[in-house]
Image (tube, rainbow, N blue to C red):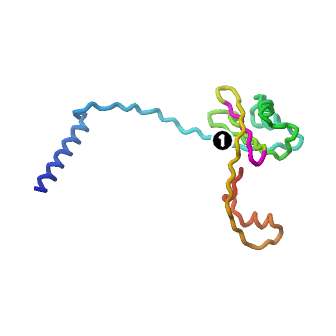
Amino acid sequence: MRRVRVTLACVILAAASLLALSGRWPWRRLEVAAAPRQAPSIIRETRDTLRSGETLADVFGRQGMGNAGLVGLFEKAGLDLRRLRSGLVIQFRRPDTLTSPNEVSIRTTPEERLAARLDAGAWTAERRPVAWHSQVLRVDGPIDNSLYEALDARIADSVLDSE
């Protein structure tokens, strides 16, 4: 009896497979339109540093942005241009499809970042909190020169975030 059931099940599965493959299935097939495949856009991220005697407009010009009106936008968003110091790191992001950046980010305080984004031909700026998380890390070893150099030699770069 068990053998008959197994044989009958195999016959039913074979018949269903043949009907499905031949397109003569009793139910109407649903047409699924294949979405066009887009190659994933690669985002290029660069960082530039404000040098001594430079203005923010100089850095934007060096990144190929020209006069995009970003200096005024950042100033309206709360960036005090008189307090900018050399060494300030400015982050630029652009997809491969664009020739100039469409996102600019400046860390204004340890807890906050000011970001501007180009959407539909217009720049908008917003303040974004910097997400900090603490992690206990134990490092041991000799201090030959200075504490900074000893820690730099012992802690892998992958452990510390570059932000």
**Splitting the image into 4 quarters, where does residue 65 fall?**
top right
Q: Relative to 154, is 18 on the left or the right? A: left
Q: Which residue is located at x 71 percent, y 50 percent?
A: 163
The residue lying furthest to the right in this view is 53
**Splitting the image into 4 quarters, where does residue 77 fall?**
top right
In the image, the segment drawn in magenta is 109-118
Q: Which residue is located at x 76 percent, y 41 percent?
A: 106
Q: Which quarter of the rendering shows the N terminus? A: bottom left
**Splitting the image into 4 quarters, where does residue 160 fall?**
bottom right
- Tell me which amino acid carries mark 1: Arg
Residue under label 1: 44
Q: Nearer the viewer, residue 145 or 115?
A: 115
Q: Residues within 10 Å of mark 1 (few under 14, many from 20)?
A: few
Q: Relative to 122, is 28 on the left or the right? A: left
Q: Relative to 158, is 48 on the left or the right? A: right
Residue 48 visible in the shown view: no
Magenta-span inclusion, residue 57: no
Q: How many numbered tags mark residues here?
A: 1
Q: Position of residue 110 (x, y in %)?
A: 76, 48
Q: Position of residue 158 (x, y in %)?
A: 66, 58
Q: Nearer the viewer, residue 26 or 20?
A: 26
Q: Which residue is located at x 74 percent, y 65 percent?
A: 153
Relative to 146, is 131 above or below? above
Q: Main secondary structure of the magenta part?
A: strand
Q: Position of residue 21 (x, y in %)?
A: 25, 38
Helix, strand or loop status at disc 1: strand
Q: Position of residue 157 (x, y in %)?
A: 69, 59
Q: Nearer the viewer, residue 145 or 132?
A: 132
Relative to 91, is 149 above or below? below
Relative to 13, is 36 above or below? above
Q: Which residue is located at x 69 percent, y 68 percent?
A: 138
Magenta-span inclusion, residue 111: yes
